[in-house]
Structures are given as structure tokens and as C-alpha cells.
Amino acid sequence: AGARHSEKGFYASTIANLQKGRPRMWAPVAYAYFFTAVILRLLTKEARRYARLRTRFLAEGDDDDGPQARCSVVVERVPKALRSDDALTAYFRRLMGADAVHSAA
């Protein structure tokens, strides 16, 4: 039989204290695969939950915010002819429909 390792303290319960070629060596490998599978499952569940909550938030919003806060966009490099509030509002109403534009400022 092989010589017993004589690790002390914390190292007595680590992989460093296992004898080479013994079946106990597979326990840490099995644990690592099991732990990885559990973590991946939890991450998948959390990602699905986050996606569901985020979609609901984008659709319904927060109690403190109005619908304009959720649907606002920033438009840059506006042509000079559309740089007044009225002209920009009229342009977006023609483009998106009258009900789709709250304001353009």
C-alpha cells in the first residue's frame, strides 16, 4: 500500500491529501460537474426571470414614470428645416402617426 499523506489542518481535507490512483479522486470531479450544472441552471432561471420582468417593465413602466419616459428617443443631426418644435412635431406625426408623438422639443 502507498504511504499515507500527512497533511495537517485545512490541507487534510483537500485534494492534496488524496493518494494517487484512488477512487476518492473522482469525488471532487463529480462535485465540480454537479456544482457547475446547478449554477448554470440557476443562471438560466435568473436570466429568464430578468427577461420577463424587463419586458413587463418596458411594456407597463414604473408607477413613478409616465408613458413618455419609457418611449422617449434622442434625435441628433436634425436638418435645419426641422429645428423648430412645430416643424419637428409635424414631421414625426407624418412619419409615425398623430397618436405616436407626444411632443418634439
Image: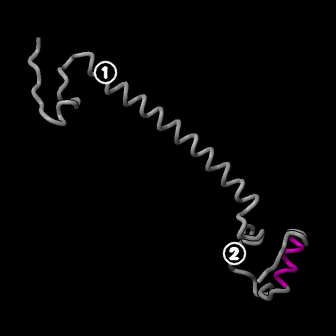
Say which residue appears at 17% left-offset and 27% top-offset. 17
Q: What is the secondary structure assignment of the residue under circle 2?
A: loop
Instruction: Specify whether 83 is left or right of 93.
Output: left
Q: Are marks 2 and 1 in contact (CB under 8 Å)?
A: no
Q: Residues within 10 Å of mark 2 (few under 14, many from 20)?
A: few
Please tell me which residue lies in front, 87 or 62: 62
Q: Residue 14 location in percent, x, y?
A: 22, 31
Q: Which residue is mark 2?
A: 74
Give left or right: position of 78 versus 46.
Answer: right
Please report the bounds of the magenta region as a residue range: 87-95
Q: Is residue 75 left or right of residue 7?
A: right
Image point (11%, 11%), residue name: 1
Residue at coordinates 27% horizontally, 16% vertically from top-left? 23
- Which of labels 2 and 1 is toward the front? 1
Of the image marks 2 and 1, the number of the one nearer the N terminus: 1
The majority secondary structure of the magenta stretch comes to helix
Q: Which mark is residue 101?
A: none
User: Toward the viewer: 2 or 72?
Assistant: 2
Residue that label 1 marks: 26
Name the quarter where the C terminus is drawn.
bottom right
Is the residue 40 above or below the residue 99 in the image? above
Q: Is residue 83 above or below residue 49?
A: below
Distance from Cα at disc 2 to Cα at disc 1: 58 Å
Q: How many marks?
A: 2
At a point 73% along the width and 62% down the height, the residue shown is: 61
